[in-house]
Image (cartoon, grey):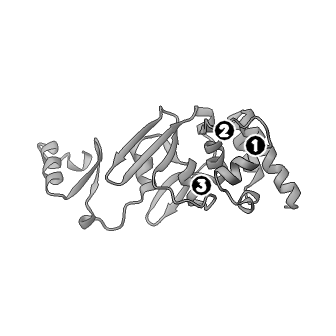
Amino acid sequence: MDALSGYRKPRDKITRFLAGGEIIRIKKGLYCFSEVFRREPIRREYLANLIYGPSYVSLEYALSIYGLIPERVETVTSVTCRRSRNFDTAFGRFSYRMLEISRYSTGATLDSRGSVSFLVASPEKALADKVWTDKRFSGIRMADYAVYLTEDLRIDPNALDRLDLIRLQDVAAAFNSKKINNMVRYLKLIKESSGA
């Protein structure tokens, strides 16, 4: 709307642009140029930060970006400190999971790809977010993590070995949760047994 503030009836102009296919509605109040008028492709991760905020890309989508899980993830998954929501747009589905502010505020990083930057969880934070939000997994016993991480999530054990333990411990401190602490203890055991 700010870009059209010079027009007497900016909403009418938006309606004409939409009808003419010059812009695409992402959600109420958020639009982008159609492909013909764009200088470069739209980054879905960047859109995820704009659609619902504050938020940053995390969970399965971030795990996929980092190559921790083998599947290609179509839904852009994010965490937020607001209530959980889903948005179906012309650019696909965007899913937001709520975390308490103390758990939300640790582990995000600014990623620059092309001419845009977006907020994304570190690999360690994305994994903790996934473990924390997965209600199917209790994480009570440390032995459960071997099956959950390598079979359910299909994370390569070598990829687990590359995770930064100091970052994991910082994330675990923010979560203050037995479930995440058990994950960190399990990953620490893996590192020790591999000699890393």
Going by the numbered disc 3, the residue's amino acid type is: Leu
User: Which element carries disc 2, helix, strand or loop?
Assistant: loop
Going by the numbered disc 1, the residue's amino acid type is: Asp
Q: Is residue 152 left or right of residue 112?
A: right
Whole-number angstrom distance, CA of label 3 to CA of label 1 = 20 Å
Q: Nearer the viewer, mark 3 or mark 1?
A: 1
Name the residue that disc number 1 marks. 144
Residue nearest the viewer, comparing 10 with 92: 92
Q: Residues within 10 Å of mark 1 (few under 14, many from 20)?
A: some
Residue positioned 61% across, 44% down in the render: 130
Q: Is residue 99 above or below residue 13?
A: above
Q: Is residue 194 left or right of residue 34?
A: right
Say which label, 2 or 1, has the lower sequence index: 2
Q: Is residue 123 left or right of residue 119?
A: right
Disc 3 to disc 2: CB gap under 8 Å: no
User: Which element carries disc 3, helix, strand or loop?
Assistant: helix
Q: Is residue 34 left or right of residue 132?
A: left
Give the image location of residue 45, x and y in percent.
Answer: 46, 54
Disc 3 to disc 1: CB gap under 8 Å: no
Whole-number angstrom distance, CA of label 2 to CA of label 1 = 9 Å
Residue positioned 72% across, 33% down in the render: 177
Residue nearest the viewer, comparing 172 with 132: 132
Give the image location of residue 32, x and y in percent.
Answer: 29, 55
Residue positioned 49% across, 43% down in the render: 55
Name the residue that disc number 2 marks. 137
Name the residue that disc number 3 marks. 63
Whole-number angstrom distance, CA of label 3 to CA of label 2 = 17 Å
